[in-house]
Image (cartoon, rainbow, N blue to C red):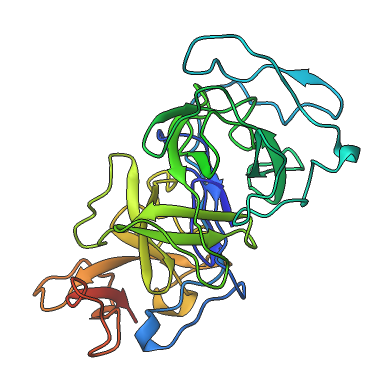
Amino acid sequence: MIVGRALGALGLVAGLGCGPQVLLEEEGDADVTGDASDGPSTTGVTTVPPPSTSTSTTSPPPPPGTTTSPPPPPDGTDDSVFIPDPDSGDWGDRCDVFAQDCPDGEKCMPWANDGGQSWNALRCSPIFPNPGQPGAPCLVEGSPYSGIDSCDLGGMCWEVDPETLTGTCVAMCTGGPDAPMCEPGFECVMANDGVLALCLASCNPLAQDCFEGEGCYPVTPSIFECAPDASGGAGAGQPCDYINACTPGTMCADIGLVPDCMGPAGCCTSFCSLGDPAPPCLPGQTCEPYFALGSAPPGYELLGVCEL
């Protein structure tokens, strides 16, 4: 699942220095063990957010029936927003992120209904005046997991900094859970039991062509997306619990692929380029094709992974 900044069969959590921690869990079974065409196993790892250097903490969503003020909308006005009472029908798993079936002036949003750091439920949230479009800066209310932000209908504030509560609007997937759609250049990442359905930029783990503070991680065995680096410096051979809990250039893999792995979920292992005479593998590992012969998508033909 995604907690702050992390991805994959494991969760996804938000990354260090890029915002809140996000845990993403891959849809389906906790352990992802596709065949060779789907890439190596990435055991139930979720993404995690980067650790905060601040001693302050963010508070969970306000209690039912209270009034809260959202982050200042783009026009600088100070419009208060009333959070719906949980018994009103507009709180909890009562909406659909694809259908966006909330009342006018509201949108269906992921949030953490337990005050934690992983989106685990859906709720209808107010849409601020002059809401932000995908790519625009945004603000969240209360905490990165409150489900209240300044993005427009069909958007969510992503990679939120836990101290400033600022991030960037990203589009939610359209279509439906069985046939999700995104704009060209983006892939639909569905995680946390379907609570998250976001259009994230695709990337290449050999190029690591993501923004600073992010890494290119396998959110599914065959799809790579930019996600916050929540590794805290954990490199090859070190335990991992989340997809993005490994340094950029590595991935959280099954314990059987990494020598002396002591992680309960898995350990980090390096990506490598096929044919590299000196791949960045641990002793005993070799650079093997990530995809089965002939099944690699265009641009990923040389992608390898270090494994036993």
Could you tell me residue 273's position as x and y percent? 17, 71
Residue 68 at x, y = what percent?
A: 73, 19
Give x and y (percent) for residue 13: 52, 48
**Side of 60 relative to 15 (left or right):** right
Quadrant of residue 251 within the rendered picture = bottom left
In the picture, the quarter occupied by the N terminus is: bottom right
**Outermost residue, right side:** 87
Is 48 placed above or below 46 here? above
The residue lying toward the viewer, choosing from 246 and 223, is 223
Residue 235 visible in image = no
- Judge left or right: residue 121 versus residue 37: right
Identified at 52% across, 40% down, the residue is: 156
Q: Report the residue at 63% width, 44% height from top.
A: 109
- Residue found at the far front of this picture: 104
**70 lies above or below 265:** above
Q: Nearer the viewer, residue 219 or 52?
A: 219
Q: Is residue 145 visible?
A: yes
- Residue at x 25%, y 62% (from the top left corner): 204
Q: Nearer the viewer, residue 130 or 116?
A: 130
Q: At 34% from the left edge and 82% from the top edge, which residue is drawn?
A: 308
Q: Position of residue 71 (x, y in %)?
A: 57, 19
